Image (tube, grey):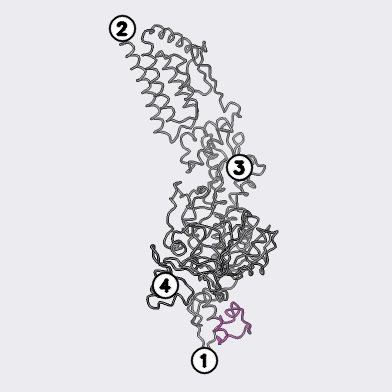
Amino acid sequence: MRELNRVLRSRALQVLFAFQDAVSAIVALKLTSPFIATSIKYDAFVSRMTAEALRLGVPSKLLAVPHKVLNRPRSDYILAGAALALILAVVLKIFAHGNTFPALQAEQASTASSLTAAPVSGSPATALATTNPENALEQRVVPDPLALLDPADRVIAEKIRDLLATKSARIFASKKEREAVEAFYQKRSLAPLWLDKGIENARAKSVIARIKNADADGLDLNDYYIPNFSGLGPDVLAEADLKLTQSVLTYARHVQAGRFPYHSVSRNIQLPQAPPEPIEVLSSISAASDAGEALDKFSPQQEPYQKLKVALAQLRNKTGGARSEIADGPVLTYSREHQMEDPRVPLVRQRLKLAGDPSDLRYDATVADAVKNYQRANQLPATGSLDARTVRELSGPTHDKQIEIIIANMERWRWYPHDLGSAYVLVNQPDFTLKVMHDGQQEWATQIVIGKPSMPTPLLSETMKYITINPTWHVPPSIVQNEYLPALAQDPSVLARMGLRVHYGRDGVEITQPPGEKNALGRIRFNFPNRFLVYQHDTPDKYMFGHDVRAESHGCMRVQDPAKYAEVLLNIARPDEHWTVEKVDSMFGSAEQDIQLQPTPIWVHLTYQTAFVDDGGKLQMRRDVYNLDSRTLAAIRSERANIDSVPEGKSEQVTASGSTRRAGRPLLDSFFPSFFFAGRPLRPPRGIY
């Protein structure tokens, strides 16, 4: 019995040492490759481990469970775990048959003889042959995926397989793209995508032609590798095939979602910015009769984007500027006693749309007053003098600058949904306008007031949920502490004269303004809940709509004709109720009421279009009130990063590295939470001004 126990312990140690070598092989393979990519390495490992186990006397039935585990989705961690499980199983089996060691030896001899009939190999086509299915593994045949390929393609496919196993991380920066590319090529038996029998195919020529026209969409051709397939060997052809695949995926991502995450420009943005799925790109292009046309479909299809694309092409075809610039010169000032004359005056008069004789060079009172009004409207020192800064504003952007501005606007359009919806509200902040679109037609448009540069209105896309008639204004704590309490200390009746009510409680002072004509929100509020806590509303300060530049609010949008706006929205959402302005007006009073717009989805898209094409087909340029053009252009010049989609309900964009930023308190420069709601629930919204 002692001798038997000694033999059993010796057998157990042999098994442990054998599998220690196998696990070490896994670790070495993990260190030399980012991930185990081909089935050959797995099959080689499985065959080696199975043969060793059978040689040492492990019954074939005992191998069935780990053998099944080893043939599940391949991972080095699963293999290592299965190996450890097999080690323990062998030890238990040996000690459980302590009195039947001869039987164990007999089974070892049987299985060993069966293995000699078919040697173990690492090739996918090799089978583990057995003569007795009851005592050994059943024969497992793995077909060679390259066997059916043309010989010219097969040699390239072998090189593609090697590249995917060893160098794919150098070609595809994103793990998601690497996995999609590997799955795609495995499905097509590793056949090259852009070559037929070693020669560039029509699919490759079509996508290359489309990528070479990248500047038509404001993209940079230098961002995309364009291979030359002529006269290359299999190694270089395989790498060129994968690199063109990478270029196609990068181009599709850039043209659909942009070249960088939008938070590189501002944190005051929340938009979908959804890149295409890599497998979707490859599948659609490989199946299309015209691959270049299929690639083009990933570009934004919104009408404003397509119009800018046409305008960009037209502008590039021009050799000079769109209009004459006003030359630099001495400062012109008006004097009743001595009127200055200058050859620039006729062009200044033309810019300001003043009537006059082109030969009249006098800088008279009419011109000086028009210059002063222009300066005031554009937030310049209203001196009435034609100085260098005013000349630059009047001249507008140069030809090259106009091209840059269009490119910046096209980049921002990629962040929005490509389908804006059948019914939506489109706000253009630099134009200070709002328009309602329904079934491709403009239903209505009006002027708005947006946030001042220090408290900018955000860019976002949300659905309009409901309209509030007779809203109550809950004064934000920041205004209470910084403005109203100091005023109250000096004059106890000042807030009462303003129609505000002061409430003292355990949580401090709360100040509200009940519904009414003088309410800061006016009579109507339009609610599309968002993390910036902004919305649209009426205002008692109607004089603001007379200004050319209307960036004067604390972030929300004030609507010039809110009753008409409500009528238009309600007739889209609730067409059977026949809403009119008079019906909306009849609800004005002291009782707050909510009118639901759901389930009809009416989208609200807050956009920033400093360049757009109007209904007459003319390119329009607007002042960059929030300095977003310069920041967008700076990011275009310096940043390239992968963009991952944000899961539904998340309020922060996934960063370029793929990690997510925890949704937290918005930055101080946003100002919206403290100013509007101070952490109160989103519904009902409070604290706008």
**Chain-order first, disc 2 or disc 4:** 2
The crowding category of the residue bearing disc 3, from other C-alpha atoms within 10 Å (few below 14, some 14 to 19, many at least 20), is many
Residue type (three-letter) at the residue carrying disc 1? His
The amino acid marked with disc number 3 is Ala
Residue 340 position (above or below residue 607): below
**SS at circle 1:** loop
Residue at 60% across / 55% down in the picture? Answer: 216
Of the residues tagged 1 and 2, which is closer to the observer? Answer: 2
* Label 2: how many Cα within 10 Å (few below 14, some 14–19, many 20+): few
Q: Nearer the viewer, mark 4 or mark 3?
A: 4
- Mark 1 or mark 3: whose residue is earlier in sequence: 3
| Residue found at x 53% / y 76% | 377
Q: Nearer the viewer, mark 1 or mark 3?
A: 1
Please identify the quarter of the rendering in which residue 527 is found.
bottom right
The x, y position of residue 451, in whole percent, is 50, 67
Name the residue carrying label 3. Answer: 204
Pointer 1 residue: 338
Mark 2 lies on a secondary structure that is: loop
Query: Would you name the residue on which mark 4 appears?
Result: 484
Q: Residue 240 magenta-drawn?
A: no
Q: Is residue 439 left or right of residue 344?
A: right
